[in-house]
Image: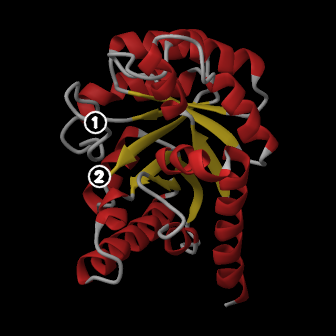
Amino acid sequence: MRLGVNIDHVATVRNARGETHPDPIRAAKIVQKAGADGITAHLREDRRHIKDRDIELLREEIDLPLNLEMAPTDEMLDIALKVLPNAVCLVPEKREERTTEGGLDIAGNIEKLEPFVRQLNNAGIRLSLFIEPDQNQLDASKVLGAPVVELHTGAYCLEKVGSIKQSNALTQIIDSASYAKKLGIECHAGHGLSFSTVEKIASIPNIVELNIGHFLIGEAIFEGLEQSISRMRALMKSARSKVLKD
């Protein structure tokens, strides 16, 4: 199972002072040293954390694959086609939200999204759609020709541990990952994952990649970024190993 680390909130801390420290590029180099498989960065319309120059430097200076999260807008499409990241994950975006609040409504926006999917695919950029774990959204993703989806794990992570609601949310993720495989779509997952929630998600065999950011950057304050990533990788590996043994 691959691990992509989102470095957005290194830039959030940097921007709080309007200066240059801490540097997201330095963080990306630590992520690489720690053994992660990719870097994720969300270039928002309001540039609240990652800036355009950050994306350019990540592409130029970091050997790991770059996954650019972006809203499906003409501005962001132009940037993606210029920078040519390894991957693009299309996500919903509202200016007033603190963080991404849910998945894209693919089923209700097929015509709007089709030009983005087509142009990114034609450019050789691995495209994924950030969606809720829902069969209708997966069917629509298949219609669009998206090779990858990323399932939103926020509902599972935010529910009380051991509760019926959390159990139901996990079942939805498991069922959606299985359905994605039947459709021939590669399945990723992310949002809100932590040391206490990652193992259940990592044990789902049809999910091949996790993208984790805010928790790892926050945990780095207490134990360092490299150590936090190493611990997360160990938990993922342990969960995956149990599945393989079974």
Circle 1 packing at 10 Å, graded few (<14), some (14-19), many (20+), is: few
User: Where's residue 238, x and y in %?
Assistant: 69, 76
In the rendered view of the protein, which quadrant contains the N terminus? bottom right
Q: Nearer the viewer, mark 1 or mark 2?
A: 1
Q: Amino acid at mark 1?
A: Arg
> Which quadrant: the C terminus?
bottom right
Residue shown at the point (39%, 66%) measured from the top left: 176
Q: Which sits earlier in the primary sequence, circle 1 or circle 2?
A: 1
Give the residue pinned by disc 2: 137
Return the residue nearer the eye: 116 or 151: 151
Q: Is residue 61 visible?
A: yes
Above or below residue 156? Residue 29 is: above
Q: Is residue 209 above or below residue 121?
A: below
Give SS at disc 1: loop
Q: State whether residue 205 is above or below residue 28.
A: below
Residue placed most toward the observer, 81 or 232: 232
Q: Position of residue 52 (x, y in %)?
A: 51, 11
- Residue 49 horizontal side relative to residue 134, left or right: right
Q: Element at badge 2? A: helix
The kind of residue on which mark 2 rests is: Gln
Crowdedness near tag 2: few (<14), some (14–19) or many (≥20) residues, C-alpha within 10 Å: many
| Location of residue 71 in the rendering, given as x and y in whole percent from the top left corner | 35, 26
> For residue 98, which numbered disc appears in the image?
1
Q: Nearer the viewer, residue 111 or 155?
A: 155
At 63% from the left and 22% from the top, the residue drawn is 23
Q: Judge from the rendering whether residue 201 lies leftward or rightward of residue 31; answer left or right.
A: left
Foreground residue among 205 and 45: 45
Q: Residue at the bottom extreme?
A: 246
State the separation of the CA atoms marked 1 and 2: 24 Å
**Residue 88 seen:** no
Q: Residue, x 32% and y 80% (percent of image)?
A: 167
Height in image: 212 above or below 81? below
